[in-house]
Image (cartoon, rainbow, N blue to C red):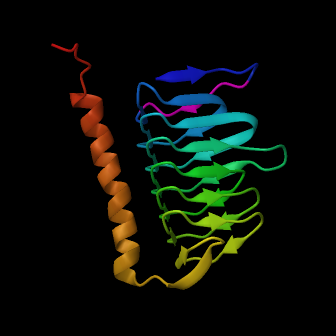
């Protein structure tokens, strides 16, 4: 893993967090308990603070960044899918951001939301709790029911278990 201090800004990483070897965590970043950062993800806290809540997973090739005046925070037990772009936004608890989604400065995503794969959440857009959002630009399609919200939680739990497995079992090998 590549963890970098930038000037006087040093990542604050909980001892139970797991970070893949080729992920990059830079500057003013806080990683909560049981959080995970997967392969090729980049979290760059050079302009404002980035907070990743307890139990949240940041999947492969995701990029997280901020602009001055636009910090980035992700709540607890969230799933941030593969190749997501998060920029200066706020994401509530137990929310899933689908693969390839883009969320821009000032956007606020509520608790228990599902942002569909490839969706674009434009600047300063507010998504209420329990919403399913799809499309470009992202539009609320419907409210999630209790079963769908539970599936969001199960996704986060799966990644917590998988990160624990990778911490114990992942071994680098040489080609034969």
Number of numbered discs? 0
Place of residue 85 in the rendered image (x, y in percent of width and height, measured from the top left): 60, 50
Residue 174 image offset from top left, x and y in percent = 22, 13
Q: Is residue 113 above or below residue 102?
A: below
Between 78 and 115, the one nearer to me in the picture: 115
Viewer-nearest residue: 162 or 120: 120
Residue at 65% from the left image edge and 59% from the top image edge: 103
Percent across and percent down for residue 81 are 45, 54
Q: Is residue 132 above or below residue 33?
A: below
Q: Which range is magenta? A: 9-15
What residue is rendered at 57% in x and 73% in y?
Answer: 135
Vertical placement of residue 103 versus 151, above or below: above
Question: Is residue 77 toward the left or the right of residue 67 in the image?
Answer: left
**With 58 as the anchor, is 46 left or right in this view?**
right
Q: Is residue 110 magenta?
A: no
Q: Residue at image x 45%, y 26%?
A: 22
Rendered residue at 62%/79% (across/down): 139
91 on left or right of 99 = right
Please identify the quadrant where the C terminus is shown.
Answer: top left
In the figure, residue 108 lies in which quadrant?
Answer: bottom right
When the figure is inspected, residue 38 is found, relative to residue 150, above or below; the finding is: above
Outermost residue, left side: 176
x and y percentages locating residue 140 in the rendered image: 59, 81
Tell me which secondary structure the magenta stretch mostly adopts: loop
């Amino acid at each position: 893993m590549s963890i970098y201090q930038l000037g006087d800004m040093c990542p604050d990483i909980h001892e139970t967090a797991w970070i893949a070897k080729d992920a990059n965590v830079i500057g003013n970043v806080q990683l909560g308990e049981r959080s995970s950062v997967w392969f090729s993800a980049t979290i760059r806290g050079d302009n404002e603070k980035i907070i990743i809540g307890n139990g949240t997973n940041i999947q492969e090739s995701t990029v997280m960044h901020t602009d001055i005046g636009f910090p980035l925070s992700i709540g607890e037990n969230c799933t941030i899918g593969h190749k997501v772009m998060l920029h200066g936004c706020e994401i509530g608890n137990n929310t899933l951001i689908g693969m390839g989604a883009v969320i821009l400065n000032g956007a606020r995503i509520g608790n228990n939301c599902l942002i569909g794969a490839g969706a674009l959440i434009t600047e300063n857009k507010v998504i209420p709790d329990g919403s399913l959002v799809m499309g470009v630009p992202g539009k609320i399609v419907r409210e999630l029911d209790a079963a769908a919200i539970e599936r969001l939680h199960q996704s986060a739990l799966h990644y917590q278990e998988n990160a624990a497995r990778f911490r114990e079992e992942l071994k680098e090998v040489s080609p034969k």
